[in-house]
Amino acid sequence: MNDISGNPEPLRLHIPPHRPQPGGHADFSDLRLPPAGNFAKPATDVPSVETHPLATALIRVLDDDEGKPSRAVGEWDPQLDAETLRRGLRAMMLTRAYDDRMYRAQRIGKTSFYMKCTGEEAIGVAQAMALAPDDMLFATYRQQGLLLARGYPLLDMMCQIYSNAHDPLKGRQLPVLYSSREYSFFSLSGNLGTQLPQAVGWAMASAYKGDRRIAAGWIGEGATAEADFHHALTFAAVYRAPVVLNVVNNQWAISSHQEVAGGEEATFAARAIGFGLACLRVDGNDFLAVYAATRWAAERARANHGATLIELFTYRAGSHSTSDDPTRYRPEDEPATWPLGDPIIRLKRHLIALGEWSDERHAQAEAELADIVRETNRQAEKHGTLAEGPHFSVKTMFEDVYKEMPWHLRRQRQELGV
C-alpha cells in the first residue's frame, strides 16, 4: 500500500517532560514573571472577551522583588487599610500554626490523616475576606483558611480532625473534610472535581430564587482534567451563574506536575475562553492580588454579569498529604526556591514597609498564635482522639438521614442493641 500522507516519519506521542528529578536542583528558569502592577483592571461589567488577555497574564500587586521596598502598585491594588492587612496576616499565621499542630498530631498517631496548605494560605484567607460572609463556599481539603478567616471555632476544627465526642460532624467524615451550614461552608468531598458543578448549581438556584448570595468553588489544577470541571463551565456560561470558579494551580497534583494536566501548552485560566467566561490569572502568593481579583469576580457575579474563572498560580510547599513523600518526585530544594516566595513573609514585609508592623511584633504574634493553638488542642484532646476515643455512640449512625426514621432503620438499631 502506498503512503498517501507524504510523511515518512512515524507518529510520536508527546509526554510532558518531568521537571528536574529528585536529587537534582530546582529549576524555575522557564517562568516568566511580569512586573507587579503590569496589567490594567477592567470594569466589572465588561464583556468576558475583554478579560481573555488576562488568561495569560499574571496579576501581581506586591512589588517586593529582592532589593526593593515592598510596595502595592498598579490598578489592581485593593487599597486595604493597615488593620485589614494585619487581620489577613494574622489569619494566615493562624492557619499555618494550626496546620503544623495537626500535622504533628497525625505523626504521633492521634488521627489518621491530614493535609496542609503550607504556601497557599493567602488563597483561603484573602478570598474569604473578599467574599461576603454568607456567600456559599465549595472548597477542597486545602482551603482551611476560608473557615479560619470567617471565624469558625478552632476547637470544632480540631475535634473534627480527631473524630472525637465533640466532633460537629459526629465522626462521619474523613479528617479535613469539614462542613458548616452556619458558616456557609459546604461539605467537603474527597472526590476531586465535584466542588465546581455543586457551586454552579447552588449559584443557579440562588439566582432562580432572586437571592443576593453568590457561590465560590475551588479545585486543583489536576482536577481540571475531570469531566466535572467542563460540566461546571458549560452551565456557568449558559446560565450566567453568579459564581466564582477557582483553579488552585499549586504545580503538583499528588505526584504529577501541572504540565500533565495541560499546563504545558496553555494556562488553566485560558480554559474559560472556549466557554465565553471571564478569566483572571493571579499570583496566588500575593495576598493583595488574590483579594483584588476575588473582589472583582464577586462584584461581577453579584451584578449579574456572569461567572469568572480564576487561576491562582501558587506552590504546594509541603507534601500532598501525610501519606505522601514529595522528595520522591521533586527536588528537595524546590519549595525554598519558588520564585513567588512565601505569602506570609510577603505580606509581613509589606506591612513593615508601611510602618505598620515589625519583626518584633511578628515574632510576638507567632508565639501568641502558637499558644492559642496549643491550648485549644489540649481542650480538643480532652474530648478524645481518633486513636483513643471517646467517639459518638454507634446509634448516631442512624440519625440525621431522614426527618422521621423509617421502620427498617429502627429495627436495625434495635438489633444492635443501641
Image (cartoon, rainbow, N blue to C red):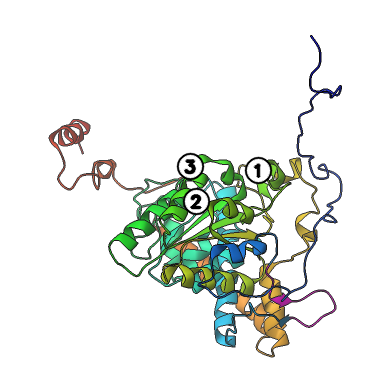
Write down the region rendered in magenta.
59-70
Residue at left offset 47%, top offset 63%: 378
Q: Do the residues labelled 3 and 1 touch (CB within 8 Å)?
A: no
Check the image and name the residue furthest to the bottom. 355
Q: Quadrant of residue 270?
A: bottom right
Could you say where residue 315 lies in the image, as x and y percent from the top left?
Answer: 69, 57
Q: How crowded is mark 2: few (under 14 residues within 10 Å), some or many (20 or more)?
A: many
How far is disc 2 from disc 1 in space, using C-alphas? 17 Å
Decide if residue 276 is in sight here: yes
- Would residue 67 be found to the left or right of residue 138 on screen? right
Q: Is mark 2 on a helix, strand or loop?
A: helix
Q: Name the residue under label 1.
A: 261
As for residue 65 lying within the magenta part, the answer is: yes
Q: In which quarter of the image is residue 211?
A: bottom left
As helix, strand or loop, the secondary structure at mark 1 comes to helix
Q: Name the residue under label 2.
A: 233
3D distance between C-alphas at marks 3 and 1: 17 Å
Q: Residue at x 38, y 63 (%)?
A: 184
The 10 Å Cα crowd at callout 3, few under 14, some 14 to 19, many 20 or more, is few
Q: Looking at the image, can residue 283 be seen?
A: no
Which numbered tag is attached to residue 191? 3
Residue 91 within the segment the image draws in magenta: no
Number of other residues with Cα within 10 Å of mark 1, as a class: few under 14, some 14 to 19, many 20 or more = many
Point out residue 304 in the picture as x, y percentages from the top left corner.
Answer: 41, 68
392 or 398, nearer to the observer: 398
Q: In the image shown, does 408 or 167 lie closer to the viewer? A: 408
Amino acid type indicated by mark 1: Ala
Q: What residue sits 77% from the left and 45% below the top?
A: 330
Q: Please identify the dominant SS of the magenta region.
A: loop
Give the CA distance from mark 2 to mark 3: 18 Å
Of callouts 3 and 1, which one flags the residue occurring earlier in the amino acid sequence?
A: 3
